[in-house]
Image: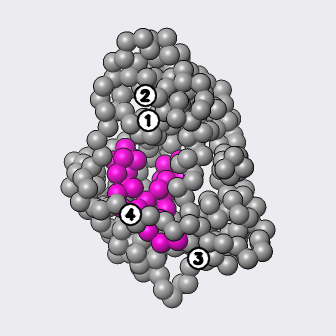
Amino acid sequence: MAAALIGLVLFRMTSCAPAPKPKPPAATPAPKAADAGPRRLSRDCRAPGWEHAAAVNASSLNALPWTPFGRDETGWRVYAPLLAREIGVDCPPESTGFARALASWQKTQGVDADGLVSQLTFLRMKGEVQGRRPIVLLSVQGVCAAPAEEASLATARPDEGFGDKLIQLRPGALVAYRRMVAAARAEEPAIAADPELLRIFSAYRSPAYDAARCAVDNNCNGRERATCSPHRTGLAMDIYLGHAPGFDADSSADENRLHMTEGPAYRWMLLNADRFGFVNYPFEPWHWEWTGEAPRTP
């Protein structure tokens, strides 16, 4: 278990070298029923005795020097909604209630239950979140998921793609996406008011396409995009959540990611996407994977 967590913490995807007779990941639980209703978090944000932890968190929120995904970042505000969701509160990150809930979560993880956001605490949480992605579980075994069979892919409607892009997914993933978007527009007025929110701007990409993009545009995203991208499975999609002025929809600039995580589309997805079988890669707010089917193995 410890080795798996270390692998999940250090890398988005591990080596793509083939492993002998790889075993497929464990069966993924069926997605939750779509009529389960929106998730509700605790709003008990006052917790006497946690004032010191709250003050420290308020100080580090925009100033903590750390490398949660292998690159230097300053502050953890961009991840505050994820942390709040995982510890089960709808509270400001500077509140005493947030600190108390975080301490309760830390206690379950066997780390100091001090209520402070730190790299160690976040990496424990990151390991849990990454472990919900079957594609990552395959990569821990040293295996790249096999590409989807292109003839079996379903094509999204033009109004489901962002910027008139051709969008293809496994049929089950597309059905789940449509159910999720319908629920989001019914439950969140701000999403219903903007028809561009939650459109897909990238879905299935063949290994050949990504390799060519890497070679021609030098747009390789390390080795993952060129040789082991989750998009090859037909289960991954990049969803438009808005963008900060001057940035593209998939810019990983901290300012752009913060803009997304503070918006209504990401907040709704973070709380409710699992009702429809979707999980997020937390460094990229826009990247979601459907867990209703297992990725194909080589």
Residue that mark 1 sits on: 87
Circle 4: element type: loop
Q: Please tell me which of labels 1 and 3 falls first in the chain.
A: 1
Q: Which residues are magenta?
A: 265-294
Q: Residue 170: where, in percent of width, then height?
A: 46, 77
- In the rendered view, would you say 269 is above or below 59? below
- Location of residue 74 in the rendering, given as x and y in whole percent from the top left corner: 61, 29
Query: CB atoms at circles 1 and 4 under 8 Å apart?
Result: no
Q: Residue 24 is drawn in which quadrant?
A: bottom right
| Kind of residue sitting beneath label 3 | Arg
Q: Which mark is residue 296?
A: 3
Residue at label 4? Answer: 31
- Check residue 276 for magenta coloring: yes
The residue depicted at 50 percent of the width and 16 percent of the height is 53
Camera-side residue of 120 and 249: 120
Label 2 with label 1: CB-CB less than 8 Å: yes
Q: Secondary structure at mark 1?
A: helix
3 and 2 marks in contact (CB < 8 Å): no
Picture coordinates of residue 143 (x, y %)? 70, 68
Disc 1 to disc 3, C-alpha distance = 32 Å
The answer to whether the residues at label 3 and label 4 have Cβ atoms under 8 Å apart is: no
Q: Amino acid at mark 2?
A: Ala
Residue that appears at 34% across and 57% down:
275
